[in-house]
C-alpha cells in the first residue's frame, strides 16, 4: 500500500511528489531535517509522538540559521504530523522525518532564493541499531564545528561528516564512531549524543563543544536528575576519559539509549552494560507511551 507524505501544505501519495534532479537540496545539501519517533502502545492501541513540539522548534531554529523560510509554526507542523500519521494509519512504532529545503533548480548553491519547501514522511522503525550494545572507536574524522557548518542545526550537508565517520568505524570492524571536536574533545556519535558515568556523576559534552543538543539527551538528563538523583556535569571531555569511565552510552531518537561496551579496543567498565544505563533505559521506555503520568506531557496521542 502506498505511503502518504506531507508536501508543501498537502497530504499526497508518496509517488505524486515531484522534486527536480537539479534541486539545490539534492545537489548541495541545502536543507535541514528532523528525526522524531512515535511509539506504539499495543495494549492501549495508541500511538504517541515523542516530544513533537520540541523537534519542530529545533527544525525551525535550523531553518532560521540556514535561511530556509517555512510558512508554518511549530504547532501547525505538529498538527500536520498528526494528520499524516492518522492518514497512514500506523499501528507500530514509527520514525517521522520532516525535511525543509531549497527546491530551486538554479545552478549555484545560494541560500537567498525563495524556493523553500517542506515535506514530512514516516516509516516503521523498531530497534534502529539492531544491537543491544556497541563497540565504538574514536574517528580520525573530526566533527564539524560551529565556524564551519553549524552542528546545532540538523543541516542535511552535515551528515556527510557523520557518514564518513560511520564508514570508517564499520570498515575497521566497529559498530559506531565517536567524533572529537576540532580541539580534540569528545563531541558525539554520528547521529547521537554521548554520556559517561564516573564516580556516580553523569558527564556529557557541553553545547560549547559543538554538539547537537539532542532531545533524547535532554530526556536522559531529566531522568538521571529527577529519578536517579545523579549529578549531571556538562563539560569538555578528553578522549582518554572514555577509557577510564565506568560506563559510556549513546542517546538519540533513532538510537534511543544504547550502551557502549568497548572504546578503541578497551573495555568500558567490565565490558557489559552498566547499571546507570540500564536504569535510564528502563525509565526512558517507561515514559515513551505516556504511561508515566509525570512525563505524559512528552507524549502526544495520535488517535
Ligand atoms: N547528534 C547528532 C549529530 C544527531 O544527528 C542526533 C539525532 N538527531 C543526535 C545527536 C541526537 O538528537 P536527538 O536525541 O534529538 O535525536
Image (spheres, rainbow, N blue to C red):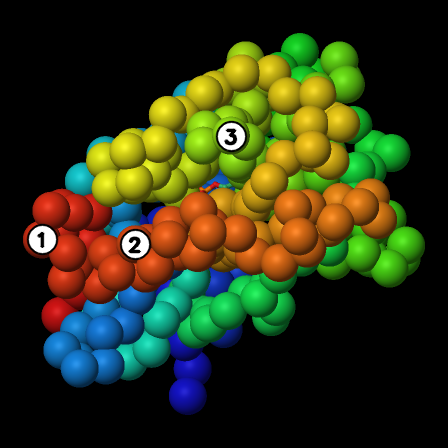
Viewer-nearest residue: 73 or 240: 240
**Quadrant that contains the C terminus:** bottom left
For the point 15% across and 56% down, which residue is it?
A: 292
Pointers 3 and 2 in contact (C-beta within 8 Å): no
Residue 14: quarter of image:
bottom left
For the point 28% across and 33% down, which residue is it?
A: 229
The residue that mark 3 highlights is 199
Viewer-nearest residue: 258 or 225: 225
Mark 1–mark 3 distance (CA, rounded to whole Å): 31 Å
Label 2 neighbourhood size at 10 Å, few (<14), some (14-19), many (20+)? some
| Ligand 1 within 8 angstroms of badge 3 C-beta | no
Residue 250: % across, % down: 55, 46
Mark 3–mark 2 distance (CA, rounded to whole Å): 21 Å
In the picture, the disc for residue 183 is: none
In the picture, the disc for residue 283 is: 2
Residue 88: quarter of image:
bottom left
Disc 2, SS = helix
Label 1 neighbourhood size at 10 Å, few (<14), some (14-19), many (20+)? few
| Ligand 1 within 8 angstroms of badge 2 C-beta | no
For the point 23% across and 74% down, which residue is it?
A: 41
Amino acid at each position: 500500500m502506498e505511503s502518504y507524505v506531507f508536501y508543501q501544505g498537502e497530504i499526497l501519495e508518496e509517488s505524486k511528489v515531484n522534486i527536480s534532479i537539479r534541486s539545490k537540496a539534492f545537489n548541495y545539501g541545502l536543507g535541514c531535517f528532523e528525526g522524531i519517533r512515535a511509539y506504539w502502545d499495543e495494549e492501549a492501541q495508541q500511538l504517541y509522538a515523542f516530544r513533537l513540539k520540541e523537534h519542530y522548534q529545533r527544525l525551525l531554529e535550523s531553518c532560521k540559521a540556514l535561511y530556509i523560510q517555512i510558512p508554518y509554526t511549530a504547532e501547525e507542523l505538529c498538527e500536520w504530523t498528526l494528520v499524516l500519521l492518522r492518514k497512514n494509519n500506523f499501528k507500530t512504532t514509527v520514525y517521522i522525518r520532516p525535511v525543509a529545503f531549497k527546491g530551486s533548480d538554479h545552478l549555484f548553491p545560494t541560500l537567498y532564493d525563495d524556493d523553500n519547501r517542506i515535506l514530512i514522511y514516516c516509516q516503521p522503525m523498531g530497534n534502529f541499531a539492531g544491537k543491544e550494545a556497541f563497540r565504538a572507536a574514536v574517528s580520525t574524522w573530526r566533527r564539524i564545528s560551529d565556524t564551519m557548518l553549524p552542528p546545532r542545526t540538523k543541516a542535511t550537508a552535515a551528515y556527510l561528516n557523520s557518514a564518513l565517520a560511520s564508514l570508517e568505524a564499520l570498515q575497521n570492524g566497529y559498530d559506531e564512531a565517536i567524533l572529537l571536536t576540532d580541539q580534540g574533545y569528545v563531541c558525539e556519535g554520528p547521529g547521537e549524543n554521548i554520556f559517561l558515568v564516573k564516580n556516580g556523576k553523569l558527564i556529557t559534552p557541553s553545547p560549547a563543544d559543538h554538539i547537537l543538543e539532542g532531545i533524547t539527551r535532554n530526556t536522559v538528563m531529566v531522568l538521571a536528575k529527577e529519578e536517579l538523583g545523579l549529578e549531571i556535569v556538562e563539560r569538555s571531555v578528553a578522549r582518554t576519559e572514555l577509557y577510564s569511565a565506568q560506563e559510556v552510552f549513546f542517546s538519540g531518537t533513532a538510537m534511543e539509549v544504547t550502551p557502549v561496551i568497548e572504546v578503541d579496543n578497551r573495555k568500558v567498565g567490565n565490558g557489559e552494560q552498566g547499571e546507570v544505563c540500564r536504569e535510564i533505559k528502563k525509565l526512558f521506555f517507561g515514559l515513551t507511551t505516556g504511561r508515566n503520568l509525570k512525563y505524559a506531557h512528552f507524549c502526544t496521542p495520535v488517535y
